[in-house]
Every structure is written in structure tokens, then in C-alpha cells.
Image (spheres, rainbow, N blue to C red):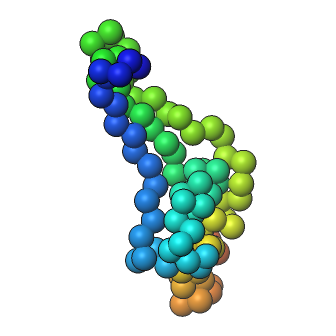
Amino acid sequence: MDGNTAAAYVSYAPCSNHGIKAGMAKTQLEAKRAVESGYWSLYRYNPELKEQGENPFHRDSKEPTESFQDFIRGEVRYASLIQKFPDTAPQLLQQA
């Protein structure tokens, strides 16, 4: 893309409601972990590609290199699921 091309990037942006166990000061690390675990994919949108007959969406993230289960257990919203529903949570997290 040249300097005149508009592109949009979509990325994971954790918030305090996610309950990041590492703390909100680690949001960049949490976003990186989300991508590396396959929880979140990075996409780029370039409208000029559509004009060229190509798909304007491009997936930038690679195949997961980290544990998906470890990632979701690092957020209180998922860890609390395990505490509140210990009998069904493992199955739900495995399906995720």
C-alpha cells in the first residue's frame, strides 16, 4: 500500500470487563496472546483490492503457537465459569 491508501486493521482490545488476571497494564501482551493462541485473528481491510477484483480482507495472523485453553483461563470471565460451573465448564471450554 502506498501512503494514500486507506486500510483498516481489526485487532483484539481487552478491557477491564474481561478481567485480565495479569492486569490492565498488560493489555498489549494480552492482545498478543489472543492472536498467538488462535482466540483472535488479525485482519486487514484494503478497499483498493476490491477495485482490482481481489478480496479486500486479508488475514494477517498465523496458525496458533500458544495454548488456547491457557489463554482463556487467563481472563476472569472464563476462569469464573470454571468456578461457578465446575461440572459443565470443561466441556464448554473444550468446545470453544
Considering every residue shown, the one lying at the far bottom of the view is 84
Residue 69 image-quadrant placement? bottom right
Label count reads 0
Residue 28 image-quadrant placement? bottom right
**x, y percent for residue 73:** 63, 73
**x, y percent for residue 42:** 49, 42
Seen at 60% across and 61% down, the residue is: 29
Against 43, is 19 above or below? Answer: below
Q: Which corner quadrant holds the C terminus?
A: bottom right
Seen at 55% across and 77% down, the residue is: 23
Q: Nearer the viewer, residue 1 or 16?
A: 1
18 left or right, relative to 86 = left
Seen at 27% across and 12% down, the residue is: 51
Considering every residue shown, the one lying at the far top of the view is 52
Q: Which corner quadrant holds the N terminus?
A: top left
Q: Nearer the viewer, residue 79 or 26?
A: 26
Against 36, is 88 above or below? Answer: below
Q: Nearer the viewer, residue 87 or 10?
A: 10
Q: Mark yes or no: residue 94 visible.
A: no
Q: Mark yes or no: residue 18 visible.
A: yes
49 left or right, relative to 12 = left
**x, y percent for residue 32:** 59, 54
Against 95, is 47 above or below? Answer: above
**x, y percent for residue 38:** 60, 50
Residue 53 image-quadrant placement? top left
